[in-house]
Image (cartoon, helix red, strand yellow):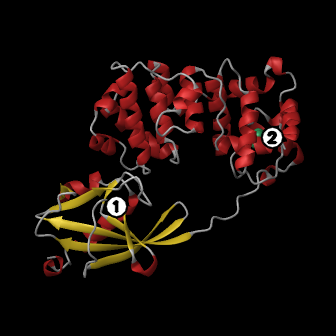
Amino acid sequence: MLTSIASSVQALNPKPSEKTFARALILWYRKQDRKLPWRERFAATGDPFAVWVSEIMLQQTTIQAVLPAYARFFETFPDIVALAKAEEEEVRLACRGLGYYRRFRFLHQAAQELVRRDPKGHAWPKDFKTWRELPGIGDYTAAAISSIAFGYAKGVVDGNVERVLCRLLDLRVVVDASWKRSFQKVVDALIDPEAPGDFNQAFMELGQTVCTKQNPDCSRCPLHKVCQAAQNQSQHLAPQPKPPMAFEDVSLHLWILEHKGKIGLATRHDEARFLKGSLGFPTAHEGKRGRFTWDSEVTCEPSPMILGPFRHSITKHKIEAKVHLYKLSKPLPELEWTPHEEVETRLLANLDRKAWKLYEKHRTRLDPQLLA
Ligand code: SF4
């Protein structure tokens, strides 16, 4: 596989000394001059924190969803020192609505670690390997941050880059882990060591805006001349779609516990099946023979008053969730007792928000005796 890719890369970049391929891509990217707040912030301040936060927020999240959260985050935490000093609750609030909360816990922990090394927050890792050692930083994120913020020549491979490469080389294949490893080698061979950040952003942006999944706009593409799929009119065949995901049905139970107008929230532990580290309602996963596995330290009895079920999806899981209601005479000390009116802003996960909406909808009709 690699031998054929290597010869194809040679075809893409016939004179490596002139960096033909990279130059065409970078020129196109600079001409687009797409305004995104993280690019503008980094250009204005040179602060790697601006790049780091954007790369974490953009994981599995659309640019549209990240835009307001990014602005809100920097109003609260203008730099790494401010983030390192923050309480976890403040970080939760600043990142609300983005989901996958664990990534922000890692961001917070990594900021604390870097500020421990230098209280002024100047102990930045500068290369791929040292970024990779921080909590919550995988290959893609380490390559993106080290190349964009520190000019380290390591290629990024995301879904956009994979699609562009498949079309450039007319690879009519399903991209699996082995192809991803090959693509990493290809991108590392093509990257311009003098402008690795622009090269990486250009490659991703080309996939996002021109070489899109449906209807790639080849007439606007700077790589049109070397694209084998465009020459063969086979853009729709490369890459091949992944086989449909096999969904798994899951039964979850959530408890809305009330005590004197306050609602008990629990932090899901790191072994929780879903939404690790998020603050939400005590939750249990129902296994075989009705056995419950709990997502936090709190365990509850099934309630005679149940709302739902409602449906929710998380990755390849189709969830059917039931909401149990209890009014407690004594508060459980392991829960965070939150005034009713603040619950909605503290909930980060859509699963909890849906449960809360259901509760709010039926609240006025619920018989207080049943809740007692
Ligand atoms: S020429 Fe078309 S198919 Fe080829 S990389 Fe460009 S946009 Fe994609």
SS class of the residue under badge 1?
helix
Mark 1 touches mark 2? (CB < 8 Å) = no
* Residue 184 position in % (x across, y down): 71, 37
Say whether residue 236 is visible.
Answer: yes
Specify few, some or many for label 1: CA neighbours under 10 Å numbering under 14, 14-19, or 20 or more.
Answer: some
Q: Is residue 97 above or below residue 258?
A: above
| Ligand 1 visible in quadrant | top right
Q: Quadrant of the N terminus?
A: top right
Q: In the rendering, which numbered label is found on residue 24?
A: none
C-alpha span from label 1 to label 2? 43 Å
Image point (21%, 57%), residue name: 334
Query: Would the CB of label 2 be found within 8 Å of ligand 1?
Result: yes
Q: Nearer the viewer, residue 40 or 103?
A: 103
The numbered mark at residue 353 is 1
The vertical placement of 159 against 77, above or below, is below
- Callout 1, which amino acid? Arg
- Residue drawn at x 53%, y 48% is 60
Crowd class of label 2 (few under 14; some 14 to 19; many from 20; radius 10 Å): many
Position of residue 96 relative to residue 242, above or below, is above
Q: Which residue is mark 2?
A: 168
The foreground one among 320 and 40 is 320
Task: Decide which of 83, 202 is in the foreground and name it.
Answer: 83
Task: Pinpoint residue 294: horizontal percent, then vertical percent.
Answer: 35, 65
Residue type at tag 2 = Leu
Residue at coordinates 55% horizontally, 36% vertically from top-left? 141
Within the image, what quadrant is residue 287 found in?
Answer: bottom left
Q: Position of residue 155 (x, y in %)?
A: 67, 31
Residue at screen point 75% across, 28% down: 190
User: In the visual, does 15 lie left or right of 53?
Assistant: right
